[in-house]
Image (cartoon, rainbow, N blue to C red):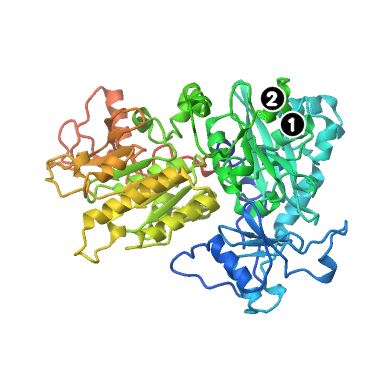
Amino acid sequence: MWVLLRSVYPLRILLSLRGKWMGWRGLPRSLVPGPPRRRYRKEALPALDVPVLPVTATEIRQYLRAHGIPFQDGHSCLRAPSPFLGASQLKDQTGATTSFSLYINKTTGRFLCMTSLAEGSWEDFQASVEGRGDGDREGILLSEAPGAEDSEEIRRIWDRAVPLWELPEQEEAQLARAMFGLTKVTDDTLKHFSVRYLRPARSLVFPWFSPGGLGLRGLKLLGAEGQGDGVHYVETTIPRPGAYHNLFGLPLISRRDVEVVLTSRELDCLALNQSTGLPTLALPRGTTCLPPDLLPYLEQFRRIVLWLGDDLRSWEAAKLFARKLNPKRCSLVRPGDQHPRPLEALNRGLNLPRILRSALPAWHKSIVSFRQLREEVLGELSNVEQVAGVRWSRFPDLNRLLKGHRKGELTVFTGPTGSGKTTFISEYALDLCTQGVNTLWGSFEISNVRLARIMLTQFALGRLEEQLDKYDEWADRFEDLPLYFMTFHGQQNIRTVIDTMQHAVYVYDICHVVIDNLQFMMGHEQLSTDRIAAQDYIVGAFRKFATDSNCHVTLVIHPRKEDDDKELQTASIFGSAKASQEADNVLILQDRKLVTGPGKRYLQLSKNRFDGDVGVFPLEFNKSSLTFSIPPKSKARLKKIKDDNGLVAKKSSSGKKGAVPRNSETFSGEAPNQPDPSQLSR
């Protein structure tokens, strides 16, 4: 769901609200990037040149025991007495003790006090316990209310929104219900969840209340637009996506509740609660990610049912989230014709409690027969296109051959030195990232600043140094992409790199890791050792990570030295045959050198374990946008002249007959069909 919504982020539905509070990109001024919403009350820990790896659960337990701190082992967190509570906070309104209200994440070490809402990193907790820093609880990172501008905007929109049943015209209320599929959702359900309707924007407004009952913390607006015979939903959040996370419906959860249903949409949350009476919550970013900061709020539940959607991508996300929540307490609703989204199931008159009872456990000790695999196989056969993976929007020829980008695979990419491997693979990954594939970049050869500059140019489809006034606009859109970078450079220990990747998969739900490149990561020390054996070990580690984490790894490897007049083959990959054997896909960027002019590039798929299709297709490099997917403007102009005059325009710079003079074209320094930033989010 979220991927579809991000593709139209500018939100035309809010244009009607223009006024003194409308600004940047047509959105409220409070959405303009500003200082962080949460601030330290003590000096922040110094930034390091290398990422700080998370502690292990064993190290956390040993530390707590060494300092005499009692704790209880939970599903994804450890519970301990909170040192941040005053005497008046030790008991809640019911008189129950709240001493064990501190939750420490077993994987990251990050803590949250559910009563005082104090939170921070594992280093912050250690500093507090050992009396370093301020020496009191004021030195903790406190969960604050939204910034002043965000709070003002949230309150303004919330006050202008009205309940659906209070709309003055009955016809307008019926139309709004029809647009969002709420014809069978009762007013009592909408009132229970405090859902409102913003008339000028024709959007539903879903509130995010503070877990501690401290008031309104954020909003999600859902607008509906007609698209052919269907309806296209458009989301926006205040504060901006990624700046704040909450669970819709969280204040309605009781301490006695032991079972909950997680959904990816607020509309599904309403339908499920109305039909089953069970506690239901909606994830803040759908199937894109489950932020670890929200795990403490789910610790109390003995059973969690994930009913995220009706497609294969939702099914994959449910399995990924179950691993984070502890699979032993999770059950998954498998997508299917009789298991649609909860709201659709309600509108079709299906029995939602029965569907929940059919949810499959996310964990089992072993697969003993085909019976456990039967439904998995049927799901793949009935959803062939979804099984093929996420399709590229910029490389249709790659879709024709490779079919799509699939989790759990290892892709090896190679090409001659100077052929543009990094430039191509950055656009290749950017294409997927704009479609919601959470991506982690490990660039060991060039700096992250240079890589980000390349990708930003490809994202904007033009050189921003020539239009610096648009930099902030494009940078804000680029910042919202689920894109992360490792800070390693040069030689690194493979275990450190793998640990960082595993941490990223847990925290950011990474689905795609790019390693550029293998040889540079290995370094040039200890030349007396068997470098081939070392490379085989590294390739095997990446293969194991891709399989165990169900994460796609794209590995860039330099080729062997070949003659310039020879094309590269699978056997040209540097090292032994292990890299090509372990890989599910092998991509080769061919660069044929020509004496008379620039070389010709084309991409060759030489191995495809998914369905065996291989082949090649040409690539044309556009220098103005640093892309291989957008044809250069001059080529399009030459083709147009040929069509209009019926002449074949030959490439020449000498002014011979049939040549097109360079000054006969208009060069603007931009890619063809340059989109308006307000119309493009990819």
Q: Horizontal placement of 283 versus 585: left or right?
A: right
State the SS at label 1. helix
Quadrant including the N terminus: top right
Q: Which residue is mark 2?
A: 345
Q: Quadrant of residue 534?
A: bottom left
Q: Horizontal placement of 20 versus 373: left or right?
A: right
Q: Is residue 183 above or below residue 462?
A: above
User: Looking at numbered disc 2 in the image, what kind of residue is underneath it?
Assistant: Ala
Do the numbered discs 2 and 1 sit on residues whose CB atoms are within 8 Å?
yes
Provide residue 331's location: percent of width, then percent of height.
63, 37
**Nearest to N terminus: mark 2 or mark 1:** 1
User: Looking at numbered disc 1 in the image, what kind of residue is underneath it?
Assistant: Ala
Residue under the image location 81 percent in, 36 percent down:
190
Crowd tier of the residue under label 2, counting other residues whose Cα lies within 10 Å: few below 14, some 14–19, many 20 or above: some
Provide residue 633's location: percent of width, then percent of height.
34, 38
Residue under the image location 65 percent in, 45 percent down:
284
> 598 or 358, which lies in front?
358
State the SS at label 2. helix
Q: Which residue is mark 1?
A: 271
Q: Quadrant of residue 119?
A: bottom right
Provide residue 347's location: percent of width, then percent of height.
72, 23
Q: Horizontal placement of 534 versus 475: left or right?
A: left
Q: Is residue 448 visible?
A: no
Q: Is residue 236 visible?
A: yes
